[in-house]
Amino acid sequence: KKMASKIRVVLRPVKSIVVRFCPFESNVESTRKFLGCINHKKIQATNRNCEVTADVRHDGSEPLVDVMFADGERLIMKGANLTTVEMLTALGSRCNAKELKEEQKSKKSP
Amino acid sequence: PLPRVPALSAARVPLSAGWLPALQFVRRGSKAVTRHWKAMHFQRQKLMAVTEYLAPRPAVPPRCLARRRETLEEDNGYAQLLRRQVEEVFRDNRMIAVCQYNSMPGEDVVLMRHYLRKHNIEVKFVLNEIVRPVLSQSKYKNLLPLFVARNILLVSREAKAKEMLRVLKGVPQINLLGACIDDTILSKQGVENFAKLPLLETVQGQTVGALALLPSQTSSLLQRGPAHLTALLDQHIHRLQAGETGSPAEPAAAQSSGAH
C-alpha cells in the first residue's frame, strides 16, 4: 500500500497551488493530508518559487485543489471523493509529463 | 563399523511431503536403529499413513462468523495522562485555537513559540486519537470534525486574537481552522471579526454613553422650564437694578417676585 508521504512530486513546472477547504465538513480529510504532504521539506525543495496557499472557508463548499502551472495550464482537483494518494499521483504524473516535454524542448533547441 | 560388503536392495518408499527420492536403497543386514534413515516395514508404513494427524476444521470458517468486538483494553497510563492534560487545557483556557500544522523547520517552530509566548499563548501538539474521545464526551462535539490530519492547539487565558493572527500571518505553514473562545465556537472568519472588535472597556464605555443619552435628554427637558424661569428672573432683576439707579422701583420688583 502506498504511503502518501512517500510519493515524491517534482514541483518545478508548478507556479502556485491553492488548497481550499472547509474544516468543519467531514469530507476534507484527504485534502488536508494532501496539503500536509505538499508542504513537506523535500517537495518544497524542488521548487522554492511555488506558492502554496491554504484557503480556509466556512461556507460548506467542497474541498478543492487548484494547481496553476508555469505554462498556463490549470489543474483542478475536487477532493471530496478522492484519496490523498490519488491526488498526489495525478499531480505527480502531470508534473513529470511537463518535465519531459521541457527537457525535449531544451534538447531540440540548444 | 566393520567393513562389510554392502548388499543393497531397492525398496519403494511412498512419496511423502518431503523430497525423498522414489527409490531408497535399503541395506539388508543393518540393525534396527541406524544412523541413516531406514525405510520402515511396509506394514508400518501403511499404519503410519493411516494414522497421520488431521487438524480439526471448524464447520463454519471463522471469517464467515461475525467478528467479536475487541475491547480496547490498551488504556495505558501515558494515554490517560495525555487525555487528562487535554481536559485540563479545555477547562483552564479561555481561547483555544485549532490550526493545521504542515511540517515546518525547527527554528521556525521555536521562533513562533517565542512570539506567541510573549502574548501568553501556549502551543500544544496534540494527537487526534487522544483528543477525539475527550471531545466526544465533553460539550465540544462540534470541534470533532476539525481533528483530522496533523493539528496544533494554541491556548491562552486571554483572548488576544489580533496578536495571534499577526503571528500566524508570518508563518505560512500553519493554517488556522477554527477557535473556541469563551465557549463559543468560531470559524476563521469569526476569529478575524473577533479580532477587529474594539477592546471591552471601549465597548463598555460606548454602551454606557448610549444608555446614559436618553436619561440625560429627559433631565435636560425637565430642567428647561425652571431654568428658563430662573433666567428670566435674573434678567428682570438686572433690569430693575439698572432701573433703580435711575428711579427707585423696588416695591414693584418685590411684588413681581413675590407673585411668582
Image (tube, coloured by chain):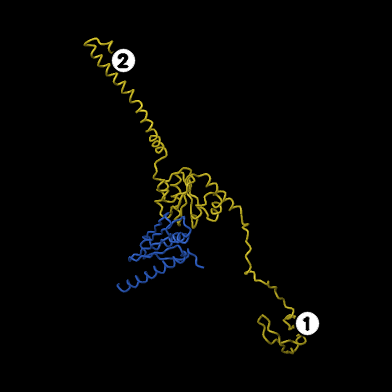
Res B129 → quadrant: bottom right
Res A21 → quadrant: bottom left
Give the label, 2 or 1, closer to the camera.
Answer: 2
Label annotation for residue B32: 1
Which chain does yellow denote in the image? B
Q: Earlier in the sequence, mark 2 or mark 1?
A: 1
Spatial CA distance of label 2 from label 1 is 154 Å
Nearer to me, B160 or B246: B246
Up the image or down, B201 lies above or below B165; here it is above
Nearer to me, A8 or B165: B165
Find residue B225 and report its horizontal and vertical position in percent. 33, 24
Give the left or right position of residue B86, taking residue B207 as reference.
right
Up the image or down, B209 lies above or below A50; here it is above
Which residue in the structure is indicated by mark 2? B257
| The N terminus of chain B, quarter of image | bottom right
Chain hosting mark 2:
B
Find residue B52 and report its horizontal and vertical position in percent. 72, 78
Find residue A36 and report its horizontal and vertical position in percent. 45, 59
Give the left or right position of residue A78, taking residue B28 as reference.
left
What number of labels is visible? 2
Up the image or down, B46 lies above or below B203; here it is below
Task: For mark 1, give the secondary structure.
Answer: loop
| The C terminus of chain B, quarter of image | top left
Crowd tier of the residue under label 2, counting other residues whose Cα lies within 10 Å: few below 14, some 14–19, many 20 or above: few
Chain hosting mark 1:
B
What shade does chain A have?
blue
Amino acid carrying mark 2 in the image: Ser
Task: For mark 2, give the secondary structure.
Answer: helix
